[in-house]
Each structure stands twice: as structure tokens, then as C-alpha cells.
Image: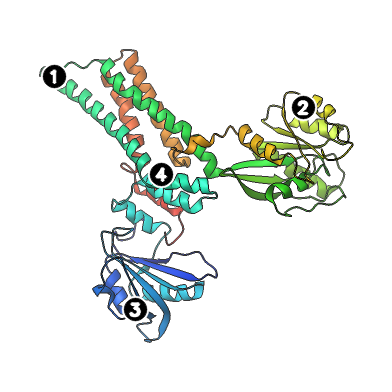
Amino acid sequence: MTSQAPNDTISAIGTPPGEGGLCVVRMSGSDTFAIADRVFKGASRPSECGTHTIHHGHVIDPRSRERVDEVLMSVFRSPRTYTREDLIEFSGHGGMVPGGMILDVLIRSGARLAEPGEFTKRAFLNGRIDLLQAEAVGELIRARTDACARAALRQLNGTCSQQIDEFRIKLIQIIAYIEVTLDFTEEGLPDITPRTFLDQLRPVREALGRLIKSSHETRVLRDGIRVALLGKPNVGKSSLLNMLTARDRAIVHPESGTTRDTIEESVDIRGVPIVFVDTAGIRKTSNRVEQQGVIRSRSELEQADIPLAVFDATSPPDDDDRQLVKMLSGRAAVFIFNKCDLDAYDPNAYLELTAGGRWIRTSAKHGDGLENLREAILETARFDPAGFESGLVVNARQGELLDQAKTSLDRGIGVLEEGLGAEMAAVDLRECAHRLGVLVGKEIGDAVLDHVFSRFCIGK
């Protein structure tokens, strides 16, 4: 991405592939209007159109003069555009063929195919948004629930970026004063004690700590919670999955062992994406196919954020049930005593077996206890919905930088508290300021930028 000219003209399809009502093809760069003049025929030439206006016409092939598609052309003049460059969008008929034909004409007329995320990268490089806001665009596109989308939108408005940059500027001011006092010790500058620096740094540390804590909640919104349904065959795991997802996603049959492979389904619970995984029954078996299913079930147990252990409470626990409880030792699991609608239901033996654990009584057949189960999942994950109201939707890059910045700040404060000298503390404070600068994109290299924007779709 860094090898391309900084203001050449790029183009890409901006709508998802497949059939649809419309297909939008975008173009941005210094030659946008020159290219548009060659390919668009309407009442006015694109170069003569005012900004933020829409015009009806046709895209034509300059070589054959044939019409390619009937379009609405949206005109945006620099700097009041997404990229802060001249930008035009052609809205044509849906489907990949019409859009691909328009894109082909634009590329043959002087544009080049945009790389993934290049429109948003230009918005960042041209100063319209910072790096946190740019990454929020990607999070918004990938959001799986309304709550995740709202969190990304809050990050996109720049409030979080502004707060982090204020921390960085405060650190730079303190570092500058420390360095000035070292360089001009005989100039009669006001004597600033370590306590003065500490009074300014501790609020920054507290605010950064709150941001990191809230980011843990928003990370759940981003990545979701993986929940594995475990248990021996025929205890009702597949029925529970179907009830939780409101779909006949898994086969339900009186014959045991009908689930031989894992089945995944994502559900929105109070704004949190929950990925339920129905697994094959865990039991001793000589059937080689079923053995492979058991191996995969054990693997899902290791990967799951929360295991849901399902038991048929109409019959007493057997060796398979006891083995499952043993496997879950030390895990934050939820125990489900299923089939509470049947006369033979008796959970007492299971209460003794799972003593001290979180348990829920359910009827997968009638849906009893499902709301309690949903609440138990969120509580077991220690998810606080209030925590993401002002938090940062954190990816791996951001999380690592936040932790590194906090560690450096802790060290710098520790040096001042121990009276080891402001000049030594300045080393850690400078490292903290650098990490915060990388976080918002004030200090960052091309390789990191290319990695960040490579995760975007082409056309955004």
C-alpha cells in the first residue's frame, strides 16, 4: 500500500457482492473529475457540478461509446469529503456484473483499483480522522450486534481519541519541564517538586486505568462469548440450542448420538454476541466416528469462554456425568438440570455432584428457564453492560499499547514516589507518551498502517 502515489486516483465497489437493489462504485483522487468527464453523460459535465449534488445520467465506455449502466452520480468536492479529496460515487444497478463493468471503465480511463481500506487510510493521512477513529470504521462494519455498533460509533466521534491525546500532551508538557530544569539549572526557574508532578500524573493514571477496565467490557462486544454445550448423548443439548437460537439448527431425535460434529450459532443477548456450540455427546464409546466427535467436544471445552454442562435430571448421574464434572473442575461453568417438565425430574443427586456450582433448571422442550440461563451466561462472563457505555472497542493492537502505556506510567510514578529523580522518571513518561501517540496514530510507521488497513474491505 505504501508504494502507491499519495494522491493518485483510486476506485472500488463500495457495496457487498451479490444481488441487490444498488451497486455503488467510488472514486477518489486528483483526477476524479477528469476521469468522470470522460465516462459520464448527463445534463452536466461532472467537473461543472457543485459539491454534494446528485445527477442522473449514464456511464459510457469511452472506446465504444456504448452505455454501460444508468446511474445516479453523487459529487463531493475536496475538502468536504470522506477522504478530503475530490470524490464521486456512481450508484448503478445491483449485482456484481453492472458494478464490475463500471469499475472496469473507470480503471481503463485512468483510475486504479483501491487496496483494502485505502479510502479510510486516505481519510486518516489527510487528517480527517485519527487512527482510533479509522479502526472504529472497521469495527462498525464488522459489528454483530446493535450494542457493538453503538460502541464503534462512539469511538468514531473522536471523544476517546481526544481523551487519550490529552493524556499524551500532559505527559509531553511534564517531560519538557523536566528537561528544561536540567538544562538551565542556574537560570532561577521555579522549583517544582516531585509531588507537583505526581499530582498531575496520578489523575492520568486513574483515567487510563478506567479506560483499560472499560475496554475489557467492550472487547466482549467485539469478540463475543463462546459458549459450549456439553454433556452425554440425549440429555437435550441440541434441543437447548434450538430453543436458544429460535431455530431448528440441530437435529433432535430420540436415538442418542445424532450430533457427531460441532454446530455453531450466534445469538444476540442484551447486545452481546454469544456463539453457542452444540457438541457431540461426551461418553466412552467404541464407535470410531463418535470417538472423533468426542475429541472435538473436548477441544471445544478448552476453547470455550463458558462451558454449559447439560444433565438429564430424570435419571441419576452415571460415570459419564461424573467424568464431565471432573473435566470442568476449576472452570467457571454453568450446570443445567434439564427436562424439568417431566414427572421423573429429580435434581437432588446432581446438586450434590455439582456442589458450589452455578446451576439452572430448564425444559428445552417448553423453554422453561431459558431467560435465567441467558442471565447466568452474562453473569458468569462477568460482563457489565454499563462498562461499554464510554469504553474503547479494543483490538489486539490497541489493547497491547494501552497496557504498555499504563505499565510505563506506573514505573514513572514509582520512580518519583521513591525519590529517585525526575530525570529518571522522564524516561518512562516518554515511553508512555510514545505508546499513546502510536495508539492514536500520531507516531506510527507505514508497516503498522498497512497492517491496520489491510483488514478492511476493498471500497471502504
Q: Which mark is residue 275?
A: none
* Dot 4 crowding, Cα within 10 Å, few <14, some 14–19, many 20+: many
**Label 1 element class:** loop
Q: CA distance from mark 1 to mark 4?
A: 41 Å
**The residue under label 1 is which amino acid type?**
Leu
Q: Residue sitting at 35 percent across and 22 percent down?
A: 202
First in residue order: circle 1 vs circle 4: 4
Q: Is residue 16 visible?
A: yes
Q: Establish if 74 lies above or below 197.
A: below
Question: Which residue is label 1 attached to?
Answer: 189
Q: Which mark is residue 39?
A: 3
Quadrant in the picture for the N terminus: bottom left
**The residue under label 3 is which amino acid type?**
Val
Q: How is the image coloured?
A: rainbow
Question: Which residue is label 2 attached to?
Answer: 354
**The residue under label 4 is which amino acid type?**
Gln
Q: Position of residue 312 (x, y in %)?
A: 83, 38
Q: Position of residue 98 (x, y in %)?
A: 47, 76
**The residue under label 2 is which amino acid type?**
Thr
First in residue order: circle 1 vs circle 3: 3
Question: Which residue is label 4 attached to?
Answer: 155
First in residue order: circle 2 vs circle 4: 4
Q: Position of residue 300 (x, y in %)?
A: 69, 42
* Dot 1 crowding, Cα within 10 Å, few <14, some 14–19, many 20+: few
Pointer 3 with pointer 2, Cβ within 8 A: no
Please tell me which residue lies in front, 52 or 283.
52
